Image (cartoon, rainbow, N blue to C red):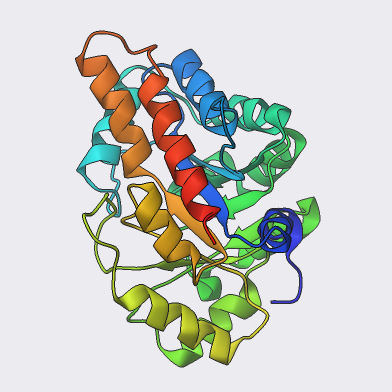
Amino acid sequence: MTNPGISGQALLRAREEGRSALVGYLPVGYPSLEGSLDAFRAICEPGDGPGVDLVEIGMPYSDPMMDGPVIQRAGTSALARGVRTRDIFRAVEAVAATGAVPVSMTYWNIVDRYGVDAFARDFANAGGAGLVTPDLTPDEAHDWLVASEEHGLDRIFLVSPSSTNERIVATAQASRGWVYATAVMGVTGARQQTSSQAPELVSRMRSLVPDTLVGVGLGVSNGDQAAEVGSFADAVIVGSALVKTLIAAEDAGNPSDLSALRAVTRDLAEGVRRR
């Protein structure tokens, strides 16, 4: 992968600072559309410290096969409250306005139904950098490869511990920006310990495709874990730990309270900055 794209440049800037980048995931539309926009801004600018470098904007989906229970709950609620595909472009604009880099994690059927070229066009026009496509493999991505080239968007494909060496090489070659390495098998969710498979997977990727930028996701929930993963990955991806704070605030009857979200973000941001 020779082209770091827009999102990869953010990882390279973090590397120049002697750290890994922090990628924060939140779903658009939860706890409400406006509430999610406020949440996106909060993780970009949490106050009293740095925030995320990239925002992974999740598009809720009716059959979230790779999402853990926390993200499923938030996504299901967002769908019930009327979130629409076009709302993702408002989220992209809100993130871009803070100076953070917006990418989207989306199941491919959403893009396909919208129209691949039309989605790429509208996403790029809103200021988006690229897509993470967990259920789309490079060998099935012809339309996306064409549209992403046409509109200058990054293609962030996934690899896992079960990926063969051949699959890793092919995925890295098809990607632009960086490659998303899932550190554990199965659905997403915060964990008490990070996966022991993650360093091995990243090492294998770098031995096969040395110039590949690698982000590691699935399981990071605090600054200590972010520091651990950041010691070997170019980016640390956090989702469920952030979404949990929004769910807790809503359950407490104050969905607009983003204080816990800001505190977790600051802890994670400090974690990736530890030497």
Rendering coords of residue 238 (x, y %): 41, 48
Where is residue 129? Give x, y as percent: 69, 48
Quarter the C terminus occupies: bottom right
Q: Foreground: 98 or 17? A: 17
Residue 209: quadrant of the picture: bottom right
- Residue 235 visible at all: yes
The vertical placement of 98 against 144, above or below, is: above
Please indicate whether residue 133 sits to the left or right of residue 148 in the image. Answer: left
Image: 187 above or below 160: above
- Name the residue at 24% across, 23% down: 248
Counting the numbered discs, the total is 0
Q: Can residue 59 be seen in this view?
A: no
- In the rendering, at what x and y percent does residue 265 appear? 46, 36
Residue at horizontal 25 percent and vertical 57 percent from the top: 187
Residue sitting nearer the eye, 169 or 233? 233
Q: In percent of the image, x 64 and y 79: which residue is there?
A: 173
